[in-house]
C-alpha cells in the first residue's frame, strides 16, 4: 500500500512537469523573433506596435556631428587686451614701470632695459627703444606719465611694424585653392594651431580641406580629424609612417576637385638641426607645387622659447621660404618681445597669435591692438 502511494505521487509530478514544459514551449513559439518572455505585455494588456529606435539614434548622431560655428576673429581681439595687460603679463609690467617712475634716473633706465631684454625684445631693438625714450622724456629728470605713455606707444608701434601686411594669402591662381603649409619644431602646438586656424577660416566663410601630412606621430591625424569634424571640414590622411608628401599631394588634388578655397597642410614637428627632416620639408613643398603654388608658409613659434625661436626661424626660412609667423602661448608670457626680433630676422610679419587654450583662442595679429594691450594698466 505504501509503495502504491509513492507511485501515484510520482505520476502526478510527472504530469505537472510535462504540462509546464508544454506551456513554456508554446509561449516561446508565440513570441516575435528576438523577444524574451520578460518583454511580453502585462496580463490584460494588448501588445502594441512601437516605432523602431533607429531614427531616434540617427537624429542623436546627426546632432552630435552638427558643425560648430566658430567665433568671429574680430571679437577675439577683446581677449587680447585682457590677457596681455600688465595685471597678468610680465612684459607689459616692464614697459609700464617707466610710467610709474617718479624720476627718470639712471637706475630707472637700467631697470627698463633689463625688463625688455628679459622679455626677449633683443639687444638691438631694446637699445633703440631706450635711446628714443631717453631723448624724448629725459627733461629735468621728471617723468610725465601721459607723455611717457604716448611716446612709448609710438616707439613700440614703430618697432612692431604697424604697416606690415598681415593678411593670409588664401587666393590660388586661376581659381585654384590657396595652399597654406604649416611648419615648426616639436612641441610648439602646431597641429592644435592648424585646428584653430581652420576655425578662423570657417568663421570667415572659407571652404577648406586639411591635410594630415604628419604621418610620424600616431595621434596627429586623429587629432586633426577631431578638429575638422567639429567644424565640418574634411581631413585627408594616409597610413601611419607613410610618405607625407603623398598625403599633401592627395589633399591638394581633392581640394582642386571639390573646388575649396584653401588647403591647409600639417607637417611633422622637426628639430631645426636635423638636416634630413628639413630636406623632407622642402620635398613636401616641391611635390605640392606640381599641382598648385604654395601661397603661404606659416612658421609656428612658441613665444615662451624666446631667443631660441630665432635659431629655429633662420633654418626653416632657408628651407621653405617662410611668409608669416604664428606666435603661440603669447598670453601671460614674459617673452612677448620676441615679436620684434623674429620679424626682423625673417623679414616677414607675425600674422596670427595664440592667446590661450580655448578652441577660438587664435586671432589675427594687429600691431595697434597688441601695443595698446601691453599699455593697458588694468
Image: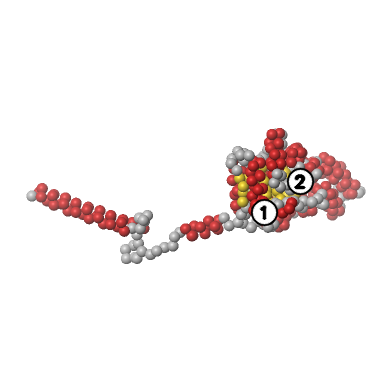
Per the model, the C-alpha gap separating discs 1 and 2 is 22 Å
Q: Residue at x 88, y 49 (%)?
A: 137
Coordinates of residue 148 in the picture (x, y in percent) = 85, 51
Q: Position of residue 356 (x, y in %)?
A: 68, 49
Q: Is residue 31 above or below residue 306?
A: below
Pick whichever, 64 or 159, lies toward us: 64
Q: Residue furthest right?
A: 140
Residue placed most toward the observer, 33 or 192: 33
**In this view, which residue lies farthest toward the left?**
1
Secondary structure under badge 2?
Answer: loop
User: Horizontal placement of 131 versus 91: left or right?
Assistant: right
Residue 175 vertical position relative to residue 272 in the rendered view, above or below: below
| Residue labelled with disc 2 | 323
Residue wearing tag 1: 260
Q: Is residue 310 left or right of residue 207?
A: right
> Residue at (74%, 41%) from the top-left corner?
320
Amino acid at each position: 500500500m505504501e509503495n502504491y502511494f509513492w507511485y501515484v505521487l510520482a505520476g502526478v509530478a510527472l504530469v505537472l512537469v510535462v504540462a509546464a514544459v508544454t506551456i513554456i514551449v508554446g509561449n516561446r513559439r508565440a513570441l516575435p523573433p528576438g523577444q524574451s518572455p520578460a518583454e511580453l505585455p502585462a496580463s490584460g494588456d494588448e501588445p502594441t506596435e512601437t516605432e523602431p529606435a533607429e531614427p531616434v539614434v540617427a537624429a542623436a548622431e546627426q546632432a552630435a556631428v552638427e558643425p560648430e560655428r566658430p567665433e568671429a576673429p574680430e571679437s577675439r581681439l577683446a581677449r587680447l587686451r585682457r590677457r596681455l595687460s600688465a595685471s597678468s603679463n610680465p612684459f607689459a609690467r616692464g614697459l609700464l614701470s617707466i610710467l610709474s617712475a617718479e624720476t627718470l634716473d639712471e637706475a630707472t633706465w637700467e631697470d627698463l632695459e633689463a625688463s625688455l631684454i628679459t622679455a626677449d625684445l633683443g639687444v638691438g631693438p631694446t637699445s633703440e627703444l631706450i635711446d628714443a625714450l631717453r631723448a624724448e622724456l629725459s627733461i629735468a629728470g621728471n617723468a610725465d606719465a601721459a607723455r611717457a605713455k604716448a611716446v612709448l606707444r609710438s616707439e613700440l608701434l614703430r618697432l612692431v611694424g604697424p604697416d606690415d601686411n598681415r593678411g593670409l594669402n588664401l587666393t590660388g591662381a586661376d581659381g585654384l585653392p590657396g595652399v597654406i603649409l604649416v611648419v615648426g619644431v616639436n612641441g610648439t602646438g602646431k597641429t592644435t594651431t592648424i585646428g584653430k586656424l581652420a576655425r578662423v577660416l570657417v568663421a570667415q566663410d572659407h571652404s577648406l580641406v586639411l591635410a594630415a601630412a604628419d604621418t610620424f606621430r600616431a595621434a596627429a591625424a586623429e587629432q586633426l580629424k577631431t578638429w575638422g569634424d567639429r567644424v565640418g571640414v574634411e581631413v585627408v590622411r594616409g597610413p601611419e609612417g607613410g610618405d607625407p608628401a603623398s598625403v599633401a599631394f592627395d589633399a591638394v588634388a581633392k581640394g582642386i576637385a571639390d573646388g575649396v578655397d584653401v588647403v591647409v597642410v600639417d607637417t611633422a614637428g622637426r628639430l631645426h638641426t636635423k638636416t634630413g627632416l628639413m630636406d623632407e620639408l622642402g620635398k613636401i613643398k616641391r611635390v605640392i607645387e606640381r599641382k598648385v603654388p604654395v601661397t603661404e608658409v606659416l612658421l609656428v613659434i612658441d613665444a615662451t622659447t624666446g631667443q631660441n625661436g630665432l635659431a629655429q626661424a633662420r633654418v626653416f626660412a632657408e628651407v621653405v621660404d617662410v611668409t608669416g609667423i604664428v606666435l603661440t602661448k603669447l598670453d601671460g608670457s614674459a617673452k612677448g618681445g620676441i615679436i620684434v626680433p623674429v620679424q626682423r630676422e625673417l623679414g616677414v610679419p607675425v600674422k596670427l597669435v595664440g592667446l590661450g587654450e580655448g578652441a577660438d583662442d587664435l586671432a589675427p595679429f594687429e600691431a595697434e591692438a597688441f601695443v595698446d594691450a601691453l599699455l593697458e594698466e588694468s
